[in-house]
Amino acid sequence: MEISCLNHPHPKGCVKCINEALPLIEGDYTIMMDSDIILPPNWQNDLIYSFRDLDNVGAIGSLLLYPQSDGIQNCGLIFAERLIKHQYFNNRTEFLSLPQYLRVQSTVFAFCAIPNEVINSVGLLDDSFFNGNEDVDYQLRIQEQGYDIFINTSIRIYHWEKSNGVHRIYNQRNNLTTLWKKHGSFIKNDLWYVLKQQLEKQLTDDNYIVLDLSESRI
């Protein structure tokens, strides 16, 4: 195994560093991963099988769990009224009936595998995002090229998520504004759809009407 490490005397931010590294990568896949994750055994094989099992794959993420609680940190992102939420956030996997492959609009770059042919088609990350939503933007661009995004729920990775820093909160409004300006007409507001799916699994009586009474989630 050959490992190359790029260094800068001063921080440049996540996007600029990834864009500097992407042209240097060889092989079939690029895997984005944070430094505060704990990988399980054989995760590489499970990941390769995912690309073989599925068609038209633009990116594959994993189920990310908090090591403190075994609660879900990320199982894909859901969207509603210019908000982005983590699907099944803090749920325990034993209480959910999850398929092995879950199609989502976006996962996160804490762990995300992308075929290099897709990267060559989509291009570099948008450096107008600073420490937030650059991964969502990139995966929406992948889908706009006609590819699909999946979570492989059988790949379960612990993620401490302790190193975001102050810049994410500081830039959150600008990042969200940029994201919706670019992709607002493409993003599907799927929060209600996900909630409805979960209710239908739990309700045994077919004679019911589900009403969304939220005036504004924002």
Image (cartoon, helix red, strand yellow):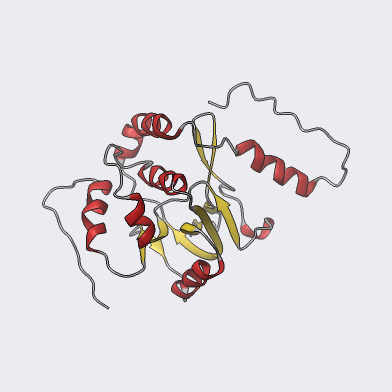
Q: Residue 105 appears at what percent x and percent y?
A: 52, 46
Q: Residue furthest top?
A: 215
Asked whether, in this view, residue 66 is left or right of residue 166, the answer is right
> Can residue 27 be seen by looking at this rendering?
yes
| Residue at 28% across, 37% down | 128
| Residue at 71% across, 46% down | 198
Q: Residue 129 appears at what percent x and percent y?
A: 31, 38
Q: Which of the two residues, 69 or 26, is positioned nearer the viewer here?
A: 26
Q: How many labels sit on residues?
A: 0
Asked whether, in this view, residue 212 is left or right of residue 81, the answer is right
Q: Residue furthest bottom?
A: 1
> Can residue 31 be seen by looking at this rendering?
no
Q: Residue 100 appears at what percent x and percent y?
A: 61, 63
| Residue at 21% across, 54% down | 20
Q: Residue 118 appears at what percent x and percent y?
A: 39, 57
| Residue at 37% across, 33% down | 172
Q: Which of the two residues, 48 or 92, is positioned nearer the viewer here?
A: 48
Asked whether, in this view, residue 47 is left or right of residue 135, the answer is right
For the N terminus, the quadrant is bottom left
Asked whether, in this view, residue 10 is left or right of residue 32, the answer is left
Vertical arrangement, residue 5 with respect to residue 102, above or below: below
